[in-house]
Structure formats: structure tokens, C-alpha cells
Image: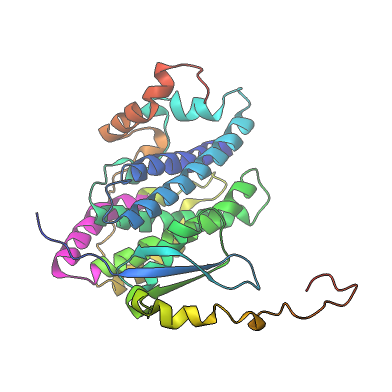
Amino acid sequence: MTADFLLGLADDALVTAQRLGWWVSRAPELEEDVALANIGLDQLGQARGLYAVVTDLEGLGRTEDDLAYLRDAPDFRNVLLVERPQTDFAVCVVRMLLLAAWQSEVYAVLAAREGPARGVAAKAVKEVAYHLDHAAQWVLRLGDGTELSHERTQAALDAEWPYLPELLEPAPAAPVDPASLRDAVLGRVRPVLHEATLVVPELPADPPTGGRAGRHTEHLAALLAEMQQVARAHPGATW
Amino acid sequence: MTTRAEWPLWEVFVRARRGMAHVHVGSLHAPDAEMALRNARDVYTRRQEGVSLWVVPAAAVVASTPDLQGAFFEPAGDKDYRHPTHYSVPEGVDHL
């Protein structure tokens, strides 16, 4: 169960890193290209650290490359939030706010107790604190900015918000029950959204879900096809 | 295609270690001071270059002009008595 749980966190981070990589050369300014690339590389580092823990725990002789490059979409355990395209900057920062709020809480718990992921989590806590801050800064400026930026950020929030509950679904057997972090995560997100003059939607009663069980949108397969193509075209290659 | 105003320019100063001065390392664009500080962190300290950052609006920097180079800097040229080179260092003083 611990390995499954950590695999979910790792896959969230890897898929996020890949999505953020898309922004390099496409962000509003060069400085933001660099910021998003840095954040993506932090996420990639977290994924790698967690994959190493997972492969140790499962003891099947798999490597982190096997997990990243040789699994198909149904084997991935990331939430749907992170796999959908994000080609709008407002979507990018709103999604980052939601994910970083969750990651801040879950890594803090893992870093505070004995366990195989303690080291990775302790390093990640500082990284995601910055991601949360970066996202919050942008959500404030775009939400409470011009009429157009407010409109687009509200639309982004309306689109991303329904995917938040999947992160917080109860899993009593997991090392950290996500449902136990629900209030803390919402407590991090809501004040930012209010200050940004955004209307916080109701959490849907029947939210989209399934990522943790390997039931993904079609977008994940497309993302993996691109991310994995070099490793699959040259099996066993090292670099 | 809409036209887009460019973000203002900021000068970035990094302090490499505690006890050292902040040193100018370059400039960047940012919409405001808070974002400038964050951009500076991302652009100029991603390889552990520093422990403290300053950002200053480039427009706030008052610079000497090349026109005044002669009047400003050349008169110091022949005044080597301003350098502390005419003192003999006592024996046994290493780190002066």
C-alpha cells in the first residue's frame, strides 16, 4: 500500500514535470520560462526520488527508468488534474496552486515521520513551498488584474476545481489518508482565491476520478507517447 | 495579435555569502517588485549563487555618463598616495 501510494505521488510529479516542460519558450516572458522549467525540474526530482523508494519497496528489480518510460497509461497512478493539457497560462498557475497546496500538506506529513519517503519528502517540502508561492503570486495578479485576466483566471478555476476532490479522496489504508488533509489543503487555497477576487465554485458531488486506479483521460496516453518515445525507440540506451 | 507592454526592467544584486556585499549580477523583466524578486531567484540563484537578493528598479539607478568620464575619474590617476601602499606591514601580520 505504501508503494502504491508513493507511486501515485511520483506519477503526479512526473506528469506535472512533463506538462511544465511544454511551457519552456512559451511562457509570457523569458523569466517565466525559467521559473516554470525550474519548477518542472523540482517535480522531476521528486518523481525520481519517489520512484527509487518504490522500486526498493516492491523489490522486483525494476528501475526508475522502467517506471517512467516502460509503463503504459493504465499503469500510471497520477490524478486526472495533472494529465490534462494546460496551454493557457491561467490554467497553468491555477492548477499549480491546487497541486502545490496538496503536495505541501502530504510531503509535510511524510517528512515528519519515520518512513521510506522521509528524505525525499523533507527536500520536497521546501520546493513545493516555492511552487505554492509562485502560483499564488500569479493567481493574485491575474485574478485581481484586468477584466480579461480575471475572466480567464475564473474560467481556469472553474475548469480545474472539479479535479481537486480526486486528490483528497479517502484512502484509510494509505500511509497518509488524503481525506485527512482536506481542510488543510482547502485552507491554503481558498484565501488566495478570495484575495484574487475569484468566485470559488462548489466542490462537485460526483467529481471526475479514476486516475489513482489507472483510469485516465485520453490525454495521458498522448503525453506518454511523446515523453517515452526516445527511451522506447532505443531500449537499454544510456545517457 | 494584440500589442503588449513590456514589463519594467530590474537590476539584480546577489550576496554570495553571509558577510559579503551584494554584487550586481544582471537584470531582468518583471511586472512588479515581488515578482522581480522571485524571477531573480529563478534566473540568478538556481546554482546556489547566493543567500540574499536585492532587486532595484533599473529606472531608479542614477549612472555617471561617459561625457563626464574625464572630470569624474581621471583626476585620481596621479594620486597614488591615496593607496595604502606607503606603509610597511609589521612582521607576523598575515592577513592585512
Q: Is residue A122 left or right of residue A75?
A: right
Residue B38 horizontal/vertical position (percent): 42, 65
Q: Which residue ends up furthest to the right in the rendered image?
A: B92
B19 or A60, nearer to the observer: B19
Range of residues picked out in magenta: A143-165
Q: Which residue ends up furthest to the left in the rendered image?
A: B1
> Relative to B55, is B46 above or below?
above
A179 or A161, nearer to the observer: A161
Q: Is residue B74 visible?
A: yes
Q: Quadrant of residue B51?
A: bottom right
Q: Is residue A133 visible?
A: no
Q: Main secondary structure of the magenta part?
A: helix
> Relative to A230, is A138 above or below?
below
> Relative to A212, is B92 above or below?
below
> Relative to A55, is A212 above or below?
below
Q: Quadrant of residue B79?
A: bottom right
Q: Which residue ends up furthest to the front in the rendered image?
A: B78
Residue at the (58%, 50%) spot, across then down: A121
Quadrant where the N terminus of chain A is found in the figure: top right
Q: Quadrant of residue A22?
A: top left
Residue at the (46%, 45%) spot, across then down: A41
Give yes or no for residue B40 being in the magenta stretch. no
Residue B61 horizontal/vertical position (percent): 38, 78
Give yes or no for residue A163 being in the magenta stretch. yes
A89 or B39, nearer to the observer: B39
Residue A82 horizontal/vertical position (percent): 35, 44
Q: Is residue A226 left or right of residue A117?
A: left
Residue at the (46%, 62%) spot, across then down: B41
Residue at the (38%, 72%) spot, across then down: B34
Q: How is the image coloured?
A: rainbow
